Amino acid sequence: MTKMAETQIIQEEQISTKDLIQKIANIFKLIGSEWKLLLIGIAAGTIISILLDIKNFKESQYYGEIQFNLESGSANQGGGMGGFAGIATAFGVGNMGAQSNDLFSGGNFNLVTSSKTLYERALMKEVTIYGKKTLFINYYKDSSDIRIKEWGGDMFHEPNKAAINFRFVPKDPEKFNKTENELVATIYEKLLKQTELKPLDKNGSIMILSATTNSEMLTKVWLETLLKTLEEFYIDVRTKKTKEIYDIQVERLNELQGKLNSTDRQLAITTFQNMNAVDPTAPMRQQQLNRNNTFISNQYYTQMATVENLRMLLIHQTPLFTLLQPVRLPLLRKDYTIGGSTKIGAFLGFFVCLIFIIARKTYQELVS
């Protein structure tokens, strides 16, 4: 590269730097000449932020939380179950707590708690409000601000009266129709944003389930309903295999009881008839019935012990929910401070006005 070319590149860089500085200086001059318009933008942003604060102040939210500890019953199977561990292993339901793909282990627990399946169960639960029973989903529709914010409509949309007036009836979520699925989806998305589950500390097992809604009673009832649903769902999953085996064994026990009752009746009748019988084969038949009765009796009592052991195994596998801090009224009211966001509003007003001034100046230069 020649010295002349290098000199030319340096001159071009100097010219571009001078142009940049000149443009920046022109921007500051433009801002100085339009200071009145900038003040108007700052004032407008401040006023809008104050109006929004006033609106939020009128729509105060109520915060509530429940603290609980969850102790998995399967965690103590190795040392505390004794003879039941053999029963669990024999039926293929042992060592549940040691599974690496456990549904409720690690971060899975938060995912389960916020799952749509769990929320649908909670929404369709029957609750008692001031002595009257109703489905929670109907109570939420009537008490929350979803009627105004999500379904109230705006200048471009009519209010969704069909959603506001719709009433749910007790039904399995699997049998929801299209309209019910749409309404539940909207409620689920809103409740998911209003609900949070987090540990009390990093190393502890105490969990905090919290919620924030526009109603004290709604917040309280929702937390209690969701926690109860979580407990039932947790127990159902933990004990599902053992319950299925237990039902099979109970059915087998009932069959043996029926057979034992039948042989008892036959043996009693045969014994009574043989008192005056002259048939030489009568004692043989009585002896055969005695053997059958003894055999079925042994099977029946063995099966009864198996069923009893499975019943105790269910108790050991049932996780223990310990409520440490229930939710009680009155709840904490999360008020908004009027004027608390004026700095942000003023900055946004200034920024928007600045963009407008620069865009207007650029347009004028292009036209001229």
Image (cartoon, helix red, strand yellow):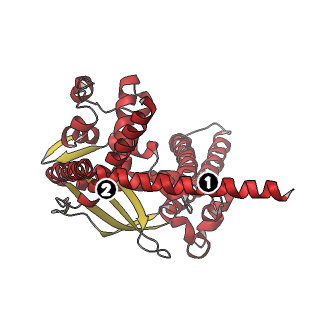
Which residue type carries mark 2? Phe
Label 1: state its secondary structure. Answer: helix
Please give the name of the residue rendered at 31% of the width and 55% of the height, measured from the top-left corner: 32
Q: Which residue is mark 1?
A: 15
Residue 304 seen from this side: no
- Label ID, residue 347: 2
Label 2: state its secondary structure. Answer: helix
Which residue type carries mark 1? Ile
- Callout count: 2
How many residues crowd around disc 1 within 10 Å: few (fewer than 14), some, or many (20 or more)? few
Mark toward the viewer: 1 or 2: 1
Between the residue at mark 1 and the residue at mark 2, the CA separation in whole angstroms equals: 34 Å
Give 350 or 343, whichever is nearer the viewer: 350
Q: Tell me: 244 left or right of 346.
A: right
Dividing the picture into quadrants, the one containing residue 347 is bottom left
How many residues crowd around disc 2 within 10 Å: few (fewer than 14), some, or many (20 or more)? some
Dividing the picture into quadrants, the one containing residue 161 is top left
Give 68 or 77, whichever is nearer the viewer: 68
Residue furthest to the right in view is 1
Residue 330, image x and y in percent?
A: 15, 63
Q: Are marks 1 and 2 in contact (CB under 8 Å)?
A: no
Please give the name of the residue rendered at 41% of the width and 34% of the height, measured from the top-left corner: 363
Residue 236, image x and y in percent?
A: 48, 51
Please give the name of the residue rendered at 25% of the width and 42% of the height, measured from the top-left corner: 140
Q: Quadrant of the C terminus?
A: top left
